[in-house]
């Protein structure tokens, strides 16, 4: 049985530029290490995808719609369903003075921002640089090696996956409790001050109500403990053992 | 019985500059209207004071320490226990160019900010203005008419008063529930996005644990309702009545 639109699934994948055989993204720590793109602070874990809803690039999304849990796929995503064709008009000459303070540091291959657009420096001439504003993977076919781990069916699995998707903390710090049709989500203390916390809550509740329509209420809970009350117990114990 | 340090009390007061008989602050809406200082968005309600802890100006705080619930006091607060003496050195000549864009708009009596200090324009000369950086009430004796409404003894009264102190919403929107030694405080939806919300929670919990030391935990709860789930009921009803 293939997935319907809006099915929540977990996938592992590794993506590479087909021609260059260059791996640039993966959900698997070992793959990242193997291809020297491992980042210490990144979260390597299966990616949550709502099938058919553009959570991943079109060509991959299409392939997922025809797959099923347990499948291993190799999907070639061509530019028309991937990062688009290369547009020669997006390669432009920029006066060096536009680069401001960075002018002395720029070298070929650098990624720079000009007029809020990001591009790659292709050539440095007299007074000007050539910058390619095409997407890094425009015109490239991307190969995805995909492992469809599971389809999430139970409310508990969906809740857990949605919280992992949105809360920027270690999985072990994610705590929630389903009480009938109300869900309590404990906000970990380390993100009480996170700048985007309100936005995190907002998108978490949107996903929750979308994928678990029977849910009626979500309570985000930030708890403070009375540290003085806590420290009383040890003091009492000391007295007793003295 | 007079209050001990840290007693939580509610007071109404009206403050005026003694010599000028000029009322400048009050907790009572009718008084504000009577003296033409009423502000539509201000919250006129008794002020919460922890006696002897500088929640109000020294001279008033001292008077409260010797009062009791039900007392009505008139307290003259002299500059040494009030807004301080006038310092002639804080009256300074400022070059007009320092005022920047405001230079053409300034008139005598205006409050302006120069070098992060707030002062009042006393005189405008050729190329310079005289600005008085003393506190508006420096050197003045202030008369407080105080009505000590009550001393807060029960945990419920303290909780309610502390929440009113910190949450910038109408009293009717403040909801909390004490479950044994844990307090749930519902954050009203209208302040989910308030810039200072984290700071509000922080100071609320500090006050709560200070004045209700037996409290072990405070949960700040932000609830989201599934609006689609809510709207299902009316739809069903329509079908039935059709």
Image: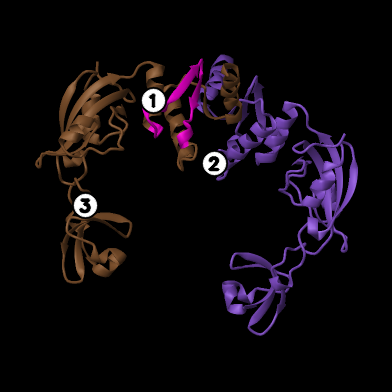
Chain colours: A brown, B purple
Q: Earlier in the sequence, mark 3 or mark 1?
A: 3
Circle 3 is placed at which residue position?
A134
Q: Position of residue A181 (x, y in %)?
A: 51, 18
Is residue A158 left or right of A44 when viewed as pictured? right
Q: Is residue B226 magenta?
A: no
Label 3: few (<14), some (14–19) or many (≥20) C-alpha neighbours in 10 Å: many
Q: Dot 1 lies on which element?
A: helix
Q: Identify the magenta region.
A: A166-191
* Residue closest to the eye, B24 or A146: B24
State how far apart marks 2 and 1 are (Cα).
28 Å
Circle 1 is placed at which residue position?
A172
Is residue B16 left or right of A5 when viewed as pictured? right
Circle 2 is placed at which residue position?
B193
Q: Position of residue A74 (x, y in %)?
A: 14, 28
Residue A22 can be seen in this image: yes
- For the C terminus of chain B, give its image quadrant: top right
Indicate the chain on which mark 2 is placed.
B
Q: Give the residue drawn at x 90%, y 40%.
A: B71
Nearer mark to the viewer, of 3 and 1:
1
* Residue closest to the eye, B89 or A173: B89
Residue B201 lies in quadrant: top right
């Amino acid at each position: 049985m293939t997935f319907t639109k809006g099915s929540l699934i977990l996938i592992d994948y590794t993506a590479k530029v087909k021609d260059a055989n260059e791996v640039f993204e993966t959900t698997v720590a070992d793959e990242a290490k193997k291809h020297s793109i491992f980042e210490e602070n990144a979260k390597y874990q299966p990616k949550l995808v709502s099938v058919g809803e553009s959570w991943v690039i079109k060509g991959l999304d299409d392939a997922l719609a025809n797959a099923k849990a347990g499948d291993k796929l190799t999907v070639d995503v061509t530019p028309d369903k991937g990062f688009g064709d290369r547009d020669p008009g997006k390669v432009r000459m920029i006066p060096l003075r536009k680069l401001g303070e960075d002018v002395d540091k720029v070298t070929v291959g650098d990624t720079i921002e000009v007029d809020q657009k990001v591009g790659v420096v292709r050539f440095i001439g007299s007074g000007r640089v050539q910058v390619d504003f095409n997407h890094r993977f425009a015109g490239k076919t991307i190969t995805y090696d995909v492992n469809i781990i599971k389809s999430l069916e139970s409310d508990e699995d969906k809740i857990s996956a949605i919280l992992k998707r949105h809360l920027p903390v270690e999985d072990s710090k994610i705590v929630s409790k389903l009480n009938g049709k109300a869900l309590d989500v404990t906000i970990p203390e380390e993100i009480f001050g996170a700048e985007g916390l309100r936005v995190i809550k907002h998108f978490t509740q949107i996903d929750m109500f979308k994928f678990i329509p029977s849910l009626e209420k979500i309570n985000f809970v930030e708890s403070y403990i009375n540290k003085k009350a806590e420290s009383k117990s040890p003091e009492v114990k000391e007295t007793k053992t003295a």
